[in-house]
Image (spheres, helix red, strand yellow):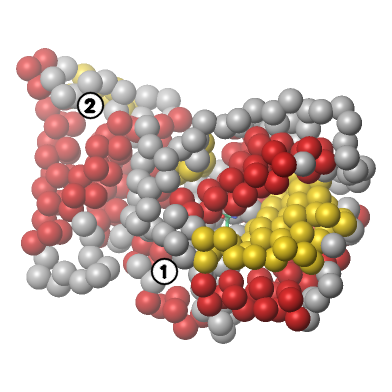
């Protein structure tokens, strides 16, 4: 099932992943991977998304249908709101989310009302919790992905929770860009890649799957919640052997890899601080500001990444950074072509599905 959420207006179709075989003759020699034990301890384990919980609750069909009717009424009522604005909820989308919430939490078929109201229905959450979850979605504008505990991204289902950015559809393109360079030159397949500010681990896992079991990916994040959630997602895709999650700020946990990375990818915080209060309620009120706030003009982390890329990438290494769009991307390209002149080649802006200059990519000379 592909789910389309409203944070971005473009639906990216999930694509089947191409699997690659490792070639035995590298064009160049990728660096040796040195592992370091750095997975931190976290007091609270990551939450289990609704669809992975055991159906340990039960309720009479009549009560489940009553919840569903109440939830539909609440969803439909938002369109009658007199305070409709750009940031209002959309009842059509809410009804779609209700369908997904029902699918994730109820294992039995509840569409056949003729079965009789007393039939017992198995649930992955108590009815009480389902009422609460839907109230939070509508009244508190809690993002649907936090309500169900997961997000569909590329062909994966990633666990997410408060404290971790919900991966966006446009970010999927970073994995496509990596796939393109890996396909062109097998050397990239067996080297060490880094995903900085990994959040849920989305990009790291996407890249890990593109490498097809040959290379390594090290993903860093300064947030312990992100580190725990990313580690959990890596485990769910059985990639612990090739993806290592390290807690720390940007390049700090990668010291032994200076000048050795064949690839560096990141979707850092890039929203200008002054724009944060005007964000959609789901984003501004619920997603971690650490993942969003990029400083005065949004470029603090991006410039830091550019400087770091010059130190961390080996000759020929590839980088891809996501930005807020055209203006920021141009600032980054200008910086790389002036202050970091003669360090990178083929620095360019790549557009997202909406035609916005969303990514800056290039190669270390
Ligand atoms: C825009 S989110 C991207 C998350 C994920 N890569 C994605 O695309 O969905 C930025 C991430 O950078 C992390 N971050 C912020 N400051 C950081 C720092 N100093 N060092 C490492 N990561 C940082 C945040 O915790 C957050 O997970």
Secondary structure of the residue carrying numbered label 1 = helix
Assess whether mark 1 and mark 2 are in contact (beta carbons under 8 angstroms): no
- Tell me which label, 2 or 1, sits earlier in the chain: 2
Q: Which residue is mark 1?
A: 284
Q: Nearer the viewer, residue 24 or 101?
A: 24
Q: CA distance from mark 2 to mark 1?
A: 36 Å
The relative height of residue 96 versus residue 61 in the rendered view (above or below) is below
The relative height of residue 84 versus residue 41 in the rendered view (above or below) is below
Mark 2 surroundings within 10 Å by alpha-carbon count, few (fewer than 14), some (14 through 19), many (20 or more): some
Horizontal side of 202 relative to 143 (left or right) equals: right
Q: Point out residue 80 in the picture as x, y percentages from the top left corner.
A: 8, 61
Q: Which mark is residue 59?
A: 2
Horizontal side of 40 relative to 282 (left or right) equals: right
Secondary structure of the residue carrying numbered label 2 = strand
Q: Point out residue 271 in the picture as x, y percentages from the top left corner.
A: 51, 73
User: Which quadrant of the frame does ligand 1 lie within?
Assistant: bottom right
């Amino acid at each position: 099932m592909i789910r389309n959420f409203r944070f971005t207006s473009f639906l990216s179709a999930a694509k089947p992943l191409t699997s690659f075989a490792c070639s035995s003759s590298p064009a160049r020699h990728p660096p040796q991977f040195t592992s370091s034990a750095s997975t931190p301890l976290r007091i609270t384990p990551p939450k289990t998304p609704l669809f992975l919980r055991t159906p340990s609750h039960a309720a009479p069909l009549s009560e489940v249908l009553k919840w569903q009717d109440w939830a539909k009424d609440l969803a439909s009522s938002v369109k009658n709101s007199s305070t409709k604005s750009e940031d209002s909820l959309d009842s059509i989308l809410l009804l779609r989310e209700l369908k997904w919430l029902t699918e994730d939490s109820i294992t039995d078929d509840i569409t056949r009302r003729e079965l009789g109201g007393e039939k017992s229905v198995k649930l992955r959450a108590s009815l009480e919790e389902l009422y609460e979850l839907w109230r939070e979605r509508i009244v508190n504008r809690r993002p649907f992905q936090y309500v169900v505990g997961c997000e569909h991204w590329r062909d994966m289902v990633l666990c997410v929770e408060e404290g971790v950015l919900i991966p966006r559809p446009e970010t999927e393109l970073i994995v496509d860009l990596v796939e393109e360079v890996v396909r062109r030159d097998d050397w990239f397949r067996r080297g060490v890649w880094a995903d900085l500010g990994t959040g849920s681990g989305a990009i790291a896992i996407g890249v890990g799957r593109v490498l097809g079991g040959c290379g390594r990916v090290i993903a860093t994040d300064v947030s312990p919640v992100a580190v725990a959630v990313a580690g959990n997602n890596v485990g769910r895709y059985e990639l612990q052997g090739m993806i290592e999650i390290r807690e720390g700020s940007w390049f700090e946990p990668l010291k032994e890899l200076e000048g050795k990375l064949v690839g560096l990818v990141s979707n850092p915080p890039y929203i200008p601080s002054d724009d944060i209060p005007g964000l959609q309620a789901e984003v501004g009120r619920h997603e971690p500001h650490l993942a969003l706030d990029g400083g005065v003009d949004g470029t603090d982390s991006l410039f830091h990444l550019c400087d770091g890329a010059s130190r961390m990438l080996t000759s020929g290494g590839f980088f891809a950074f996501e930005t807020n769009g055209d203006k920021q991307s141009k600032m980054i390209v200008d910086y790389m072509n002036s202050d970091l002149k003669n360090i990178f080649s083929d620095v360019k802006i790549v557009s997202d599905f909406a035609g916005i200059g969303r990514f800056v990519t290039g190669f270390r000379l």
